[in-house]
Amino acid sequence: MNTFGYIRVSSGDQNESRQLNAMMKLKISESHIFIDKQSGKNFKRPGWQLLMNKIEKGDVLYIKSIDRLGRNYEEIQKQWRILTKEKGVNIAVLDLPELDTRSDKDLIGTFLADTILTILSFVAENERENILKRQAEGIALAKKRGVRFGRPTKSAPDNFGEIVMLWKKGEISWDEALIKTGLKQATFYRRLKEYRSQAG
């Protein structure tokens, strides 16, 4: 029997140390701790896929809380079933001892664990939807205040018209035109379109 730990944070700038410390206290080998730094909307995560390839019947998987497993109600239920029923793996949720498949395997214990899992899976997905809603509302408010998102638009240089004429006459090459304007190809074409509409 081997013990494994799974850690997930939503993005690269979030800190996984709290989850990692919990795994270290259980003396889980570093080679058996799998970390993903991405959204919990599905299980297409490199760390999770590696874990699923390595974990076997009789092994124990530790996670800090059910939302670290994921934030998609149906997917959490599906992966839990694959691990516990198909692979024969035990799962222990550290923040909720009631969700430990090693104990209370009688009918009532199984029923309670399944009920808790169902509720928490729903809560995890609901929280994800609320986060996305708050983000969308925040972006909408920021746009109303004039905040711009994405890369800043690059303006054409003052002598853009002259450079275009030289390029059209064949006096400079396409690459030279890009260098002289300091623009990338797609941006050059956008500025060229704007220039022609203004000139025409």
Image (cartoon, rainbow, N blue to C red):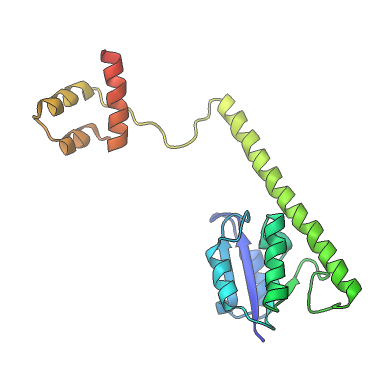
* Camera-nearest residue between 69 and 35: 69
- The answer to which quarter of the image holds residue 37 is bottom right
Give residue 135's position: percent from left, percent from top. 63, 39
- The answer to which quarter of the image holds residue 175 is top left
Report the side of 136 relative to 101 (left or right). left
- At a point 65% along the width and 70% down the height, the residue shown is 21
Give residue 186's position: percent from left, percent from top. 31, 35
- At a point 69% along the width and 83% down the height, the residue shown is 58
- At a point 58% along the width and 67% down the height, the residue shown is 48
Report the side of 191 relative to 178 (left or right). right
Residue 184 seen in the figure: no
Examine the rendered structure and indicate whether residue 58 appears above or below residue 184: below
Give residue 187's position: percent from left, percent from top. 32, 33
Report the side of 110 relative to 82 (left or right). right
Q: Quadrant of the N terminus?
A: bottom right
Name of the residue lying farthest toward the right: 108
* Camera-nearest residue between 31 and 43: 43
Name of the residue lying farthest toward the left: 171
Name of the residue lying farthest toward the front: 86
Name of the residue lying farthest toward the bottom: 1
Residue 102 seen in the figure: yes
- The answer to which quarter of the image holds residue 72 is bottom right
Q: Quadrant of the C terminus?
A: top left
Number of marks drawn: 0
Give residue 140's position: percent from left, percent from top. 60, 30
Examine the rendered structure and indicate whether residue 170 appears above or below residue 70: above
Report the side of 25 relative to 97 (left or right). left
